[in-house]
Image: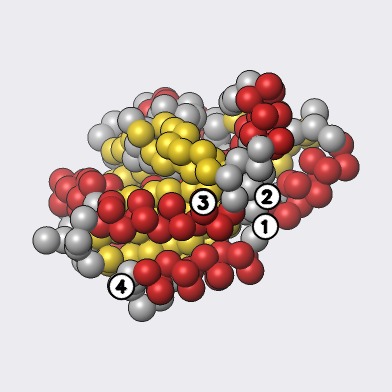
Amino acid sequence: MSSIAIVTDSDSSLPRELAEANGIRQVPINIHFGEETFQTEIDITDVALFERVDRDKALPTTSAPSPGQFADTFRAALDDGADHIVCICVSSEISSTYNAALMARDLVPEGTVTVVDSRTISMGQGFMVLEAAAAARESAGVEEILARIESVRERTTLYAGLETLKYLAMSGRVGHLAAGMASLLNIKPVLTLKDGKLDMLEKVRTRKKSWARMIELVAEGLGGASAERLAVVHVNALDRARIFDTQLRAAMDCPPETLFVEFTTGLSVHTGPGMIAAVMVAAEA
């Protein structure tokens, strides 16, 4: 019987304990403050990131794991008895992580690694990874694992509400003038995933309206189907995440448990503190 190992990157937003409990190996996104480099969820968290940003008055840069980092993880999985590895990466539209994993695939024995572009981020990716791990435990083959994670991707909706455009502006993702106007008007942008990239879907005036609109969009995304999995993702805002979850549950049928997770630094550096996102997987028809 073959053994298939599951690998991902830290942009999946999977808490380390949950990943370890499911036998998932994570390769960290790198965070750079000048000459200092930190590895996401190993030696820097969202809390520490923004403490440093507030102190330095500047954002760090981020970089994908190197091919060597991926190759080391692949070799470790093979040394531990895996016959094959399925590596699920953050969307190639927003990061070079997928390309690094492809390069690493060529550094290990031929035919031992399959690399997947999740075309999503955070728990959109994380739920695909958890499904892959479950399939691997059930002794599914590579093709079945790929089919199951594709099914999860097709049934997932993701919407995020930002507190401010300040950090997107600092990272160069939106113009400074636009960010300044948004701050002046108290605009709270609602983001979603479109073609593998974060897309500003709507701009509303208050957090209350932002959350209400996100809940409407999640319900529309489910299309009348019941929800199989739910994660509420946040950046240094667990109390708000719990309040949002209560509002979400009051508006629609939800799974018995909500997974509350941090966005993680490779992503949160672009959104800033206070972000809340809902990631919902519809049940199969």
- Quadrant position of the C terminus in the picture: bottom left
Precedes in sequence: disc 4 or disc 2: 4
Q: In 3D space, how far apart are the residues under numbered discs 2 and 1 (Cα atoms)?
A: 6 Å
Residue 137 x %, y %: 27, 65
The residue that appears at 64% across and 60% down in the rendered structure is 237
Which residue is the site of mark 2?
Answer: 273
Q: In 3D space, how far apart are the residues under numbered discs 4 and 2 (Cα atoms)?
A: 28 Å
Q: In 3D space, how far apart are the residues under numbered discs 4 and 1 (Cα atoms)?
A: 26 Å
Tag 3 near tag 1, CB within 8 Å: no
| Foreground label between 3 and 1 | 3
Q: Mark 4: give few (<14), some (14-19) or many (20+) Cα within 10 Å.
A: few
Q: Is residue 245 left or right of residue 237?
A: left
The amino acid sitting under disc 1 is: Asn
| Foreground label between 4 and 2 | 4
Q: How many marks?
A: 4
What is the number of the mark on residue 210?
A: 3
What is the number of the mark on residue 278?
A: none
Q: In 3D space, how far apart are the residues under numbered discs 3 and 1 (Cα atoms)?
A: 18 Å
The residue that appears at 31% across and 45% down in the rendered structure is 86
Residue placed most toward the observer, 109 or 63:
63
Is residue 62 something that shows in the picture? no
Q: Mark 1: give few (<14), some (14-19) or many (20+) Cα within 10 Å.
A: many
The amino acid sitting under disc 2 is: Pro
Residue 226 x %, y %: 23, 67
Q: Is residue 55 left or right of residue 258?
A: right
Q: Identify whether 2 is placed above or below 171.
A: below
Precedes in sequence: disc 4 or disc 1: 1
Residue placed most toward the observer, 232 or 118:
232
Precedes in sequence: disc 2 or disc 1: 1
Q: In 3D space, how far apart are the residues under numbered discs 2 and 3 (Cα atoms)?
A: 16 Å
Which residue is the site of mark 4?
Answer: 253
| Foreground label between 4 and 1 | 4
